[in-house]
Amino acid sequence: MTAEPIVEMRGVVKRYNALRPLRIAELSLASGGRVAVAGIDAPGAEVMLNLVTGASLPDEGDVRIFGQSTSDVSDGEQWLASLDRFGIVSERAVLLEGATLTQNLALPFALEIDPVPPDTLARVEALADECEIARDYLAQRAGDVPAAVRSRVHLARAIALNPRLLLMEHPTAALEETARTPFGKMVARVCDRRTLTMLAVTQDLQFATAAAHETLTLQGASGRLVAARRSWWRR
């Protein structure tokens, strides 16, 4: 018996003040799969992730997550409960610039972060180790650490509460070229250890090659997703 896809989008159209709406003719992502999608700009990436999480509904078509249509989520309480299944890596997830990395990584676990409780501190250190954040950085303020470290903090916070689906929204936009492949390989290791399904919207070929099983390009007019060509990707 074939399991339901984790993510399934069919005939999706979502209008969002762009020259053309976001169209997804068909996308199916199985459990444990890792897919990178190119051809979507920053506003469109936000729209796509909102469709997957159910924060917004398609104008046309159907989005099914874990076998359930997002349009069937009947009330706000049910929707908020469903968010535990997602881990989101996005620059829109703001770090507390004046707080230490330890305090930023503690936020998913505790409301009190000054000081961080000892039991939470142990969880923070384990999370930092998993995302290959050197312990020397933990006492530094988030606003003072390199972009490559900040990207790992975003990932660590996204996986802290054991989601089933990792969503990544242009995750390497702030990274230098030399940091993209190492970050992608680390994301792949994390996903493998946790059996995480991943959907990344990115223009970064180096990251996509390192992190994803499959890289696709969205054809904006038709909504078709096709095997990516190098000319689409950021060098």
Image (cartoon, grey):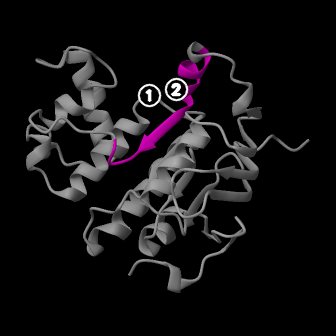
Residue on which disc 2 sits: 84
CB under 8 Å between discs 1 and 2: yes
Count of labels in the image: 2
Residue 145 lies, in percent from the top left, at 12, 51
Is tag 1's residue or tag 2's residue first in the polypeptide sequence? Answer: 2
Return the mark for residue 161. Answer: 1
x and y percent of residue 51 in the render?
60, 42
**x%, y% of residue 118?**
19, 17
What segment carries the magenta color? Answer: 78-92
Secondary structure, mark 1, is: loop
* Residue at the image point whose x is 56% and y is 30% from the top: 85
User: In this orientation, which residue lies closer to the viewer: 18 or 92?
Assistant: 18
Q: Nearer the viewer, residue 101 or 18?
A: 18
Q: Residue, x 28% and y 17% (percent of image)?
A: 110
Outermost residue to the right: 1
Disc 2 residue type (three-letter): Asp
- Estimate the x, y position of residue 107 in percent, counting from the top left: 27, 25
In the rendered image, which quarter contains the N terminus? Answer: top right
Compared with 110, 135 (above or below) is below
Q: Distance between the Cα atoms at labels 1 and 2? A: 7 Å
- Whether the magenta-drawn stretch holds residue 175 is answered as no
Which residue is more in the foreground, 164 or 98?
Answer: 98
